[in-house]
Amino acid sequence: MTDPSEPTAEPANLRFLRRLVTVLAGVMIVGLVTIVALLVIRFSSVPTTPVLPDTISLPDGVTANAVTIASDWYAVVTNDGRILIFDRPTGRLRQTVIVE
């Protein structure tokens, strides 16, 4: 009879599965740490807010419905169906687009 206290040899496929589970757990931990690090880096950066001029001179009787900001210009959509495109550094009117 065999002695129960005597260690038996581990089958090869069980050894392979144990190593596979260990490697997969390690990869999962590294992936989770990477995702958390990327989230912390992404949300800790201070967003830059665009700077608009203090005042925008619109034609008489026109009110602004929306404003769009680009790197060197900004556009104002008016209530009378026009888009007024202003130069950002100087504030002068660059172009007028009529929306039909």
Image (cartoon, rainbow, N blue to C red):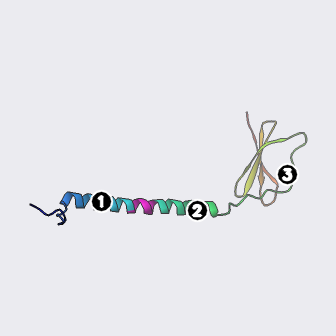
Please report the bounds of the magenta region as a residue range.
26-31
Q: In the image, residue 44 lies at what x, y percent?
A: 63, 63
N-term mark: 3 or 1 = 1
Q: Which secondary structure dominates the residues rendered in magenta?
A: helix
Query: 10 Å neighbourhood of mark 2: few (<14), some, or many (≥20)?
Result: few
Query: Circle 1 sits on which residue?
Result: 20
Residue 92: horizontal and vertical position, in percent?
Answer: 82, 54
Is residue 30 a member of the stretch shown in magenta?
yes
- Comparing marks 2 and 3, which lies closer to the viewer? 2
Q: Secondary structure at mark 3?
A: loop
Q: Which residue of the protein is positioned furthest toward the top in this rendering? A: 100
Query: Rounded to the nearest whole Å, what is the CA distance between mark 3 and mark 1?
Result: 65 Å
Find out whether the residues at labels 3 and 1 contact each other: C-beta distance under 8 Å.
no
Residue farthest toward the right in the current orientation of the protein: 60
Residue name at image x 29 percent, y 62 percent: 19
Cα distance between the residues tagged 2 and 1? 30 Å
The residue under label 3 is: 56
Identify the image quadrant of the N terminus.
Answer: bottom left
Of the numbered discs 2 and 3, the one sitting upstream in the chain is: 2
State which quadrant residue 8 falls in: bottom left
The local secondary structure at tag 1 comes to: helix
Q: Which residue matches tag 2?
A: 40
Where in the figure is residue 32, as x and y percent of width and height? 47, 59
Q: Amino acid at mark 2?
A: Val
Q: Amino acid at mark 1?
A: Leu
